[in-house]
Amino acid sequence: MDGSLDIRFAAPNVAGAISRLTHLDQRAPLRALFPHCPNMGLPVAAITATCGGFVGGDRLALNLEIGDSAALMAIGQSAEKLYRSTGAETEIRATFTLGRDAWLEYLPQETILFDGARLRRETRVEMGAGSGLLAGEILAFGRQARGETISHGLIHDSWSIHRGGKLAWADVFHGADADLVDLIDHPAALAGSRASAMLIHAGSNLAVALAWVRDKLAALNNQLRVAATIVNDVLLVRWLAPEAADIRPGFAALWMGLRAMSRGLPAQLPTFWHV
């Protein structure tokens, strides 16, 4: 399948209103829904795939453009499933462009990698002056409810953030077949964890936000492997856990707090995130 989704939002043209949709182009299986979420403080686009999951050979493109002073939350309607492949790769390319003083929250739900899945995903963010970003991902290595583990497959998952056309931060998670199995099990890598997550925050007052994040993580008092730091004006939080469900409560708590601290938005998430 060749699927694409192109969404553009602009600042409101009426004082006190929320940002407005100016362009929507979608090609199956990708689709955007716009649920009524009055308590979020900004418009919400729920991104879904009508196919129920992706297979080798699928090519998907997601483009989000947030204009000057506009704001949007793009959230996954449900978990993404990557099915076993006989060799072909699933390619996903996401491009986010933020204008001056724009704000984007990109909150997918879990990406569940079946044993033998082959995923190549690239996420690129272009940030304008004064813009802010809150983004993240959660990876589940195998269908945990079935006790499945990864014996082969491919994960190439890359992120990059650019400011003024210059690279500010980049990260790549890569493992293929035997190397992927070693990466998951090696004590200096994922140490047997069956789920990982990353939260990314780019904006202002990051030192204050980092102190709050570390205090919050300490207060949660869980046994997960989690750490937070700042790299080139990008706040990063990473988790490792036995199951993706172990990560979600802390992930959501940080997300709600950071959106409130950074943009004065309600410390809430849409109800379907919690289902």
Image: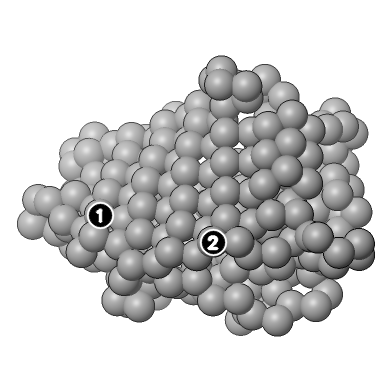
Left or right relative to 194: residue 106: right
Residue beneath disc 1: 59
Left or right relative to 173: residue 15: right
Q: Is residue 270 visible?
A: yes
The disc placed on residue 30 is none
Amino acid type of disc 2?
His
Real-space CA distance between mark 2 and mark 1, rounded to the nearest whole angstrom: 22 Å
Left or right relative to 159: residue 272: right
Tell me the residue at 43%/54% (across/down). Answer: 62
User: Percent position (x, y) of residue 82?
Assistant: 29, 62
Outermost residue, front side: 13
The disc placed on residue 23 is 2
Helix, strand or loop under label 2: strand
Amino acid type of disc 1?
Arg
User: Percent position (x, y) of residue 68?
Assistant: 73, 43
User: Percent position (x, y) of residue 106?
Assistant: 60, 54
Tell me the residue at 32%/71% (across/down). Answer: 29
